[in-house]
Amino acid sequence: MNDIAAAYVMLSLEIGTHEDGYIDAYYGPTEVKAAAEAAPRDKAALLAATRALWARLDLAAPRLSDPMERRRAAFLRAQLRAAETRLLMMQGTRFAFADEAERLFGVRPRLLPLASYDGALAKVAALVPGDGDLATRVEAYLDRFTIPKPRLQKTFDAAIARCRGRSAAQIEMPEGESFRLEFVTGKSWSGYNYYQGGYHSLIQVNTDLPIRLSRALDLGCHEGYPGHHLLNMKLEEQLVKGRGWAEFTVYPLYSPQSLIAEGSANYGIDLAFPAESRADTERDVLMPLAEIPVPADDLYWQLMDATKALQGARLTIAQQYLDGAIDRAAAVALTRKYLLMSPERADQSVRFAEQYRSYVINYGLGEAMVRGYVERGNPDRDEMWRRMAKIIGEPTLPADLLRR
């Protein structure tokens, strides 16, 4: 298994030379990366190598008696299937949206018709009455909660500190862990975590569009704690250093690993700030720091909750656009209508789908799957965190979240 893992790492790094962004993180030996980049095989050869390694794995897996080793083999098999799919896509093969998502991320999305979100739109409309289209009314209201650029650093520092504090109270942090926060421009995403290894991350926040207050805790938890930064640290601590599993030193973005990463990061927001604790933190701590007037009512938080019911529309719109059922203008218009965005924010959302394609399923669908696993059977808070720690510290696949 260790030989197969080493071959997988080299294979992944070589594939990464053919597509910018394919490798989300690598923190193994520098000489391995240098060797992969010095003489990478072409895509056809890498496709053949992927299938050959898959065959080797299928021969080795039945001999494994340790349950964790069997999970390791299942993880590698799913990662190799995703690598095969991405290599085929690099060579011109196009899959239907749902097929692509299933092959890359290990789960087939259930896409609802857009009309099924009309009821949720009506509930939002009741919260923000007035003239003009609903997206414009919602945007105008939410613009009141924009963080001024000079206040971004202090607001995000405070938000991330609180995300960390709540996570550290439940999941032990590796000694010496840290991150660096940067504000950047020119991206299709709102935030990104670049894990560096050694329990360190670079977290970037995109300021192309005005940043609203809700993004402080969202990104603090999602990119930091208990999201990407904590997940990558626990994988390094428990699997790379704890078990010597080299395959976890490399993270190919287009793989089932991403559904676990994005799903746990999204769910981690609600796990860290359940019930009224989020509103209390924003009202009492973050709004004063951001110099945003504290509202006299709860409309802001009611609206935040109501719009969550619309998030699945993003997948349906992406599927229709990427499968050619609608053109770009229609995708932007539908994003405006169902996700209640300004033209600029809708355009950014569509650009993300153009760049990352079916990757969009990992957020909403991944969150729902992690939530279903963590909250199954109505456990207490300690058990919920224990289950979260298990997800982010073991070789977890999407299918594992469905098992009782």
Image: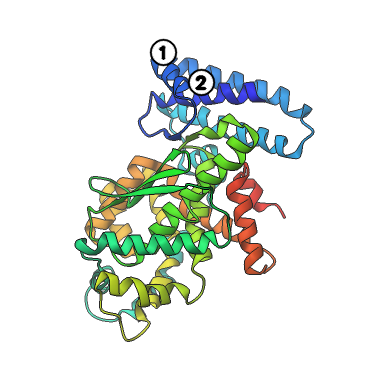
* Vertical side of 330 occupied by 195: above or below: above
Q: From this viewpoint, is residue 301 visible?
A: yes
Secondary structure beneath dot 2 equals helix
**68 above or below 274?**
above
Residue 338 showing in the rendered view: no
Q: Is residue 194 left or right of residue 1?
A: left
In the depicted structure, whether residue 281 falls above or below residue 84:
below
Amino acid type indicated by mark 2: Leu
User: In the rendering, at what x and y percent does residue 155 appear?
Assistant: 31, 64
Q: Residue at x 51, y 71 (%)?
A: 274
Which residue is label 2 attached to?
47
The residue tagged with tag 1: helix, strand or loop?
loop
Name the residue rendered at 40%, 19% in the picture.
37
Q: Position of residue 106 (x, y in %)?
A: 57, 42
Residue 404 figure quarter: bottom right
Residue 218, given in percent of the width and then of the height, sits at 40, 61
Q: Which residue is mark 1?
A: 39
